[in-house]
Image (spheres, rainbow, N blue to C red):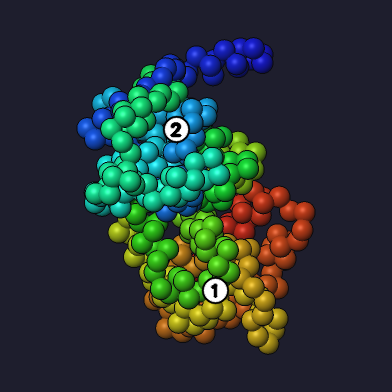
Amino acid sequence: MSLQEEIEKRASTIYKESFQMSIGELINLYRDDEMDIHPEFQRLFRWNDYQKTKFIESILLNIPIPPIFVSQNEEGVWDVIDGVQRLSTIFQFVGVLKDENGSCVQPLKLLKTDYLPSLQDVEWKSENVNYCFTREQQLVFKRSRIDIIIMKKESDPNAKYELFQRLNTGGSQLSDQEVRNCLILMANKDFYKLLIELDSYQNYKNCLPITDRKTDERYTLELLLKLIIAEYIDWNSINSYSDLYELLNKETLLLCDKQLNYDDIKDKFIKTFGLLDSIFGEDTFRRFNGTKHIGPVLSSAFQAIAVGVYHSIESILEKKDKENWLKEKINSVYENDSFKTNSLQGVKPITRYKDLSLFSINYFKL
């Protein structure tokens, strides 16, 4: 297939239309539950009150703002792909924003800016007339128009996820895993809730003493996904991925579509990290030098240990001497040729992920 044929084939699977809508119309869509802005995203998108104020100021000053991207589902409801924070700011300012539990969010109180210092403490509605929008200002604000780009329901079902990734990576403040979390929320909220529940399991956290920065970037969630993906992936398909980032994104979406037994995943996970924590605690994924565990948590050690133990946990728990057996096996991992080879610099991340996962499954198999 030629380049032009590939372009025409892909372009023909995306249907979109563009037009402008007033802020008042967008508010009505949100109130009528005809728009999903994913309130769960608010934990990931980090605008502070000053950033929100600057956005409101841009609307008031008629400064151009980027378009909002939405996709239309089978019921006609709009799923916001890009523009969650902008829309949330508008809805919070006018007092209609709800959190993920359906409770009203505290309305936004603006701050002063260089151009509009009188915005300090101004609200959409206030008992103090000196600190609220006038009726005229409210009407002008609601009549302001925003560009909307709609991906229609006839489009390729995966197109909205691809668009979200492209709009929220490269210069974004979100980490790769935070973008991935948003994709999971858009695709399968129940799977996302499972991941969050597992990630908060205390024995799991005990085994992964990591920096605050990595915690903020949801590093433990990425490790968790790597563990679950390794249990379900078709390793023959790995050559279709150009890098580990693509593999994790696409395999995650495949997991969202699978009919997984969440109770079974949770049971195996709890047993796995309950056992690992009881034996090693925070040393579970630190290198063993022959005498003691040293250094930081190693992602390669996580893959070489957690995947295999999780895969064979039921058999391991049946062993009478399971603690001593597992301790010896894990301490010996670091001298294994497969582990040492895949811990070297220069090994492709996608190759390391596959080889360490398969090594781990075979290494801990009984």
Say which mark, if any, is on residue 209: 1
The residue drawn where x is 45% and y is 23% is: 147
Q: Quadrant of residue 246?
A: top right
Q: Quadrant of residue 336?
A: bottom right
* Residue placed most toward the observer, 135 or 78: 135
Say which mark, if any, is on residue 60: 2
Most distant residue in the front direction:
130
218 vs 13: above or below? below
The answer to whether any part of residue 310 appears in the image is yes
The residue drawn where x is 53% and y is 16% is: 11
Q: Residues within 10 Å of mark 2 (few under 14, many from 20)?
A: some
116 vs 270: above or below? above
* Residue placed most toward the observer, 186 or 46: 46
**Residue 78: x and y, percent?**
33, 29
Most distant residue in the bottom direction:
291
Q: Quadrant of residue 138?
A: top left
Q: Amino acid at mark 2?
A: Leu
Q: Amino acid at mark 1?
A: Pro
The local secondary structure at tag 2 comes to helix
How many marks can you see? 2
Quarter of the image with the N terminus in it: top right
**Residue 152: x and y, percent?**
38, 21
Question: Horizontal placement of 38 versus 236: left or right?
Answer: left
The local secondary structure at tag 1 comes to loop
280 vs 345: above or below? below
